[in-house]
Image: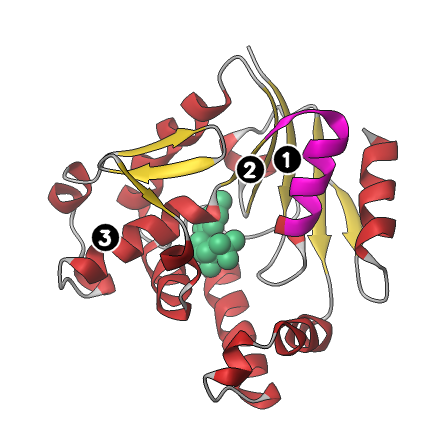
Amino acid sequence: MSTVVAIDGPAGAGKSTVARLVAARLDYSYINTGSLYRALAYAAKASGIAFDMITPEFLNSCHLEFRGADLYLNDAKLDAELRLPDCARGASIISAKPFVRDYLMPVQRNAARGQWIVMEGRDIGTVVFPDAEKKFFVTASVEERARRRMAQGNEVDCGATFESILADITARDERDMNRAVAPLKQADDAILIDTTGLSIDEVVDRITALC
Ligand code: DC
């Protein structure tokens, strides 16, 4: 048995920051499921396999496990490498493959077993935990999300512009929302939270009050 608060939404809507803070306020565990897709993209890249070319056999060589909120790939802890732009792009590509989603389903369900947990992703309230106690769909306009990424600065240091970030977010939304399996969409019983123009504290207050 587990008690799940599902927080889904598009890239860059502030989900991770909000989900982590909500979990801390409620004294729940926290898991970011995007890190699983990013970890497989990282593993493919490290093995010289193009994102499009990964196979079920390759997945079988990847043992992924959460220890608390930390993610381990074949017993090595992953952290900053997961935030590389290439891992984000690769995660979005490989996550469209049904065998990848099948492979990660038990990893996600096992991670929640016996826990009070805030789980964040794209399909938590629709597919992974359709019976989650609470479901939120956290979003913001594309321009707002691009502005937030600009403000973080690290991509700008690598030469990104507002236009290139906007194009990247739009492409990722397009892929995530239009894939055949478990596309990004709001569950019928999820509460929509549009964070455009709201501070992080306002969003966290709203979600914790509703929990
Ligand atoms: O949340 P994130 O940016 O770390 O996610 C990276 C990619 O992983 C995202 O583009 C789509 C995919 N993803 C998914 O398909 N399902 C999830 N539950 C979480 C992430």
> Could one spot residue 113 in this view of the protein?
yes
- Indicate if the residue with disc 2 has its beta carbon within 8 Å of ligand 1: yes
Q: Label 3, on which residue?
A: 43
The crowd level at tag 1 (other Cα within 10 Å; few <14, some 14-19, many 20+) is many
Instruction: Give, as a three-letter code, the residue at label 2.
Output: Ile
Q: Secondary structure at mark 2?
A: helix
- Answer above or below: position of 177 versus 2: below
Quarter of the image that includes the C terminus: top right
Mark 2 vs 1, N-terminal side: 1
Magenta span dominant secondary structure: helix
Q: Label 1, on which residue?
A: 6
- Indicate if the residue with disc 3 has its beta carbon within 8 Å of ligand 1: no
Instruction: Give, as a three-letter code, the residue at label 3.
Output: Ala
* Of residues 27 and 94, the one drawn nearer to the viewer in this rendering: 27
Q: Is residue 15 magenta?
A: no
Give the image quarter of residue 13. bottom right
Q: Is residue 18 magenta?
A: yes
Q: Label 2, on which residue?
A: 124
Figure label count: 3
Asked if the residues shown at circle 2 and circle 1 are in contact, with their CB atoms under 8 angstroms apart, the answer is yes
Residue 58, given in percent of the width and then of the height, sits at 14, 46
